[in-house]
Amino acid sequence: MDAPERLPSAVSHVVYGPLSDGAVLFSTKDEVYYGLNQIGAEIWELLPPSTETLTELCARLERRFEGIDPPSLRSDVLALLADLLANNLVEYLDQERADAGTGLETDREADPPQSG
């Protein structure tokens, strides 16, 4: 199934610091630094509310970085977003909707067995 079009948002405990060749993210919750290259920093800056969809974000990057291969760009953006999600730096505000588009499972209680 295709990745969801909706983008995750930065979590409130992450501080963004731009650098000359990228950026650094600092999780005040986990006290961990995460480095971004130039394109990674651009992606971070284009997360909601700057853009709302993956297509919109990729289109803006394609205009900014001429000559970039669109399928490779989309793949790289998805890989970065997955890494940011895994490191708790971004989140989908509507987790159930995001799970439906990715096939990811959330911890939900199963229906109790029926006694009969």
Image: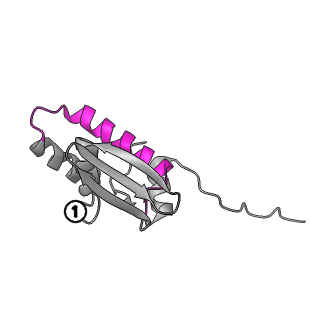
Q: Say above or below: 50 vs 85.
A: below
Number of disc labels:
1
Residue at 36%, 45% in the rendered image: 35
| Residue at image location 34% in from the left, 56% down from the top | 7
Task: Give the percent coordinates (x, y) of residue 114.
Answer: 83, 64
Quarter placement of the N terminus: top left
69 drawn magenta:
yes
Principal SS element in the magenta part?
A: helix
> In the rendered view, does 62 fall on the left or right side of 99?
left
Q: Nearer the viewer, residue 43 or 105?
A: 43
Which quarter of the figure is the C terminus placed in?
bottom right
Q: Look at the picture and state if 37 lies above or below 51.
A: above
Instruction: Tell me if 67 is positioned left or right of 46 in this view.
Output: left
Which residue shows up at 38% across the image and 51% down it? Answer: 4
Q: Nearer the viewer, residue 36 or 55?
A: 36
Vertically, is 105 above or below 10? above
Residue that label 1 marks: 50
Q: Which residues are magenta?
A: 65-92
The amino acid at mark 1 is Ser
Residue 65 locus on image (x, y percent): 12, 39
Query: Is residue 90 rendered to the left or right of residue 105?
Result: left
Depth check: 72 or 13 in front?
A: 13
- Asked whether 76 falls inside the magenta stretch, the response is yes
Q: Residue at x 34, y 57 (%)?
A: 6
Q: Nearer the viewer, residue 36 or 114?
A: 36
- Residue 112, can we see it? yes
